[in-house]
Amino acid sequence: QVQLVESGGGLVQAGGSLRLSCVASGSVFGFTVMGWYRQALGKQLELVANINNAGSINYGDFVKGRFTISRDSTKTTVDLLMNSLEPEDTAVYYCFAQQPWRPDSWGQGTQVTVSS
């Protein structure tokens, strides 16, 4: 079993920054990909960013260079630095982690609210 705990969400003004952090515990060996999704009210879940064991990174099209994902050397923590936040970035942000032998693990989500 894997537990993912997110932190760092909150309320910020447009143009501001937040850093989200996700820490994994439990059966943390063998993660292949970790990253973040988000879901705004009334909208579908969408990929924000992910990073694999080789360090390859994917960002959602809306990121446009504003966000940076990083993973620590133990590969059990994944951070998301978000700069130049816009009201459209308001959403619940979920951390996820992939292991080949089980369904993806998800965190409980952290709310990010960007005021105009």
Image (cartoon, rainbow, N blue to C red):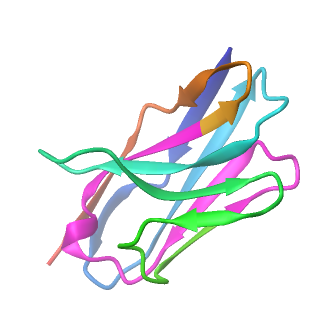
Image quarter of residue 109: top left
Image check: 36 left or right of 103?
Answer: left
| Residue 115 position (above or below residue 103) | below
| Residue 32 position (above or below residue 79) | above
In percent of width and height, residue 21 lies at 58, 52
Residue in view at x 33 percent, y 77 percent = 85
Q: How many marks?
A: 0
Quadrant of the snapshot with the C terminus: bottom left
In percent of width and height, residue 2 lies at 67, 22
In percent of width and height, residue 62 lies at 35, 73
Which residue reaches farthest top? 1
Magenta stretch: give its range: 70-96
Observer-nearest of 35 and 83: 35
| Residue 8 position (above or below residue 69) | above
In percent of width and height, residue 64 lies at 42, 82
Residue in view at x 81 percent, y 47 percent = 75
Q: Is residue 71 magenta?
A: yes
| Residue 56 position (above or below residue 4) | below
Residue in view at x 46 percent, y 81 percent = 66
Q: Is residue 72 magenta?
A: yes
Quadrant of the snapshot with the N terminus: top right
